[in-house]
Image: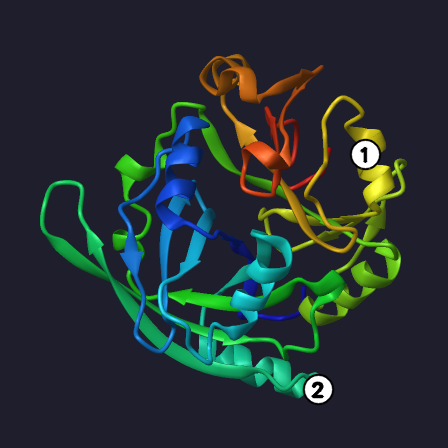
């Protein structure tokens, strides 16, 4: 990537209708979930995070309708929840906006905001961020993208929150379904100035940068062939569909997740109806992190 201030996937936003119910469900899948956070009045949202080494999953819910969260409310109304957005790490939000404008993309931002953080040892800290957004019309397969600069990493990447009973360690691949995976992959490639390559199963993979997770574009039918024993009910024909998550111990993950998981060789799969409209695939890492399976 030649974008100097965008360094790969930071987190994935999973929209949920009921924040507390979603947090409890992901806890049942063996994830450690952060205390609930509340965003600014302008954002009108709240969240729980599931922290890994370099990246994380954000469970995001609407607390108060605002102009800013109108697209998220529309997403929930249409799909009921699921993977709505992908966030990339930016080392400098202001410089990142300038970079995008130089390649002809009118970015929105930067926007500065924060939220209180309940610290594990007691007391309260603050997490502060600056974000910028790619134009709303530039959403490959309907997945919106933005970039996030973390000003207070120590109040987000808290060691106690990075240890999970299912031994989850990080994001390997974000799965996006598309009737035209190659066209949507090219679109994403242009937006983040990346490359792409094809897999034997017909999926198209776009690296997000560095050692961070890949983005895999695949038709829903091809995804169903990859996971023939798993119901994909609730996944869209076009949109964010799933996450491949690396674990340190697949057997431990299977024990923790229990009946919600389906073992398929070297993968453990949780269907969308058990994970808030997102397919979850757990794998032990093989070789370079970020390659799809």
Q: Is residue 130 left or right of residue 239?
A: left
Q: Which residue is mark 1?
A: 224
Residue 172: give x, y in percent of width and height.
61, 40
Q: Earlier in the sequence, mark 2 or mark 1?
A: 2
Q: Is residue 67 left or right of residue 145?
A: left
Residue 151: give x, y in percent of width and height.
32, 66
Q: Which quadrant, please, contains the C terminus?
A: top right
**How was the colour assigned to the protein in this rendering?**
rainbow
Q: Is any atom of residue 279 visible in this view?
A: yes
Residue lying at 62% horizontally and 80% vertically, measured from the top left:
100
Q: Is residue 102 left or right of residue 51?
A: right
Residue lying at 58% horizontally and 48% vertically, measured from the top left:
212
Q: Which quadrant, please, contains the N terminus?
A: bottom right
Neighbourhood count class around disc 2 (C-alpha, 10 Å): few under 14, some 14–19, many 20 upward: few
Residue lying at 53% horizontally and 77% vertically, measured from the top left:
96
Residue 127: give x, y in percent of width and height.
27, 61
Q: Farthest residue toward the front?
A: 77
Give the quadrant of residue 78. Answer: bottom right
Q: Which residue is mark 2?
A: 104
Neighbourhood count class around disc 1 (C-alpha, 10 Å): few under 14, some 14–19, many 20 upward: some
Marks 2 and 1: which is nearer the front?
1
CB-based contact (under 8 Å), mark 2 and mark 1: no
Label 2 sits on a secondary structure element that is loop
**Vertically, is 89 above or below 157?**
below
């Amino acid at each position: 990537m030649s974008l100097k201030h965008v360094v790969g996937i930071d987190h994935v936003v999973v929209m949920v209708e009921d924040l507390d119910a979603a947090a409890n469900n992901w806890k049942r899948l063996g994830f450690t979930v952060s205390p609930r956070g509340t965003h600014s009045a302008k954002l009108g949202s709240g969240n729980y995070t599931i922290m890994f080494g370099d990246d994380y999953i954000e469970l995001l819910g609407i607390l108060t309708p605002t102009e800013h969260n109108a697209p998220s409310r529309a997403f929930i109304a249409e799909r009921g929840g699921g993977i709505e957005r992908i966030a990339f790490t930016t080392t400098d939000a202001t410089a990142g906006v300038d970079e995008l404008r130089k390649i002809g993309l009118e970015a929105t931002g930067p926007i500065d905001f924060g939220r209180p953080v309940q610290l594990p040892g007691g007391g309260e800290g603050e997490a502060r961020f600056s974000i910028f957004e790619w134009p709303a019309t530039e959403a490959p397969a309907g997945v919106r993208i933005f970039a996030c600069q973390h000003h207070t990493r120590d109040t987000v990447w808290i060691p106690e929150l990075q240890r999970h009973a299912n031994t989850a360690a990080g994001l390997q691949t974000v799965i996006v379904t598309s009737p035209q995976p190659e066209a949507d992959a090219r679109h994403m490639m242009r937006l983040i100035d990346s490359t792409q390559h094809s897999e034997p199963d017909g999926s198209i993979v776009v690296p997000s940068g560095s050692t961070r997770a890949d983005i895999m574009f695949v038709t829903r039918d091809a995804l169903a062939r990859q996971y023939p024993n798993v119901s994909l009910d609730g996944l869209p024909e076009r949109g964010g569909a799933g996450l491949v998550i690396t674990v340190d111990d697949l057997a431990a993950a299977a024990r923790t997740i229990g009946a919600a998981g389906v073992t398929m060789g070297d993968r453990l799969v949780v269907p969308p109806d058990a994970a808030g409209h997102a397919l979850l695939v757990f794998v032990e890492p093989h070789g370079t992190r970020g390659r799809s399976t």
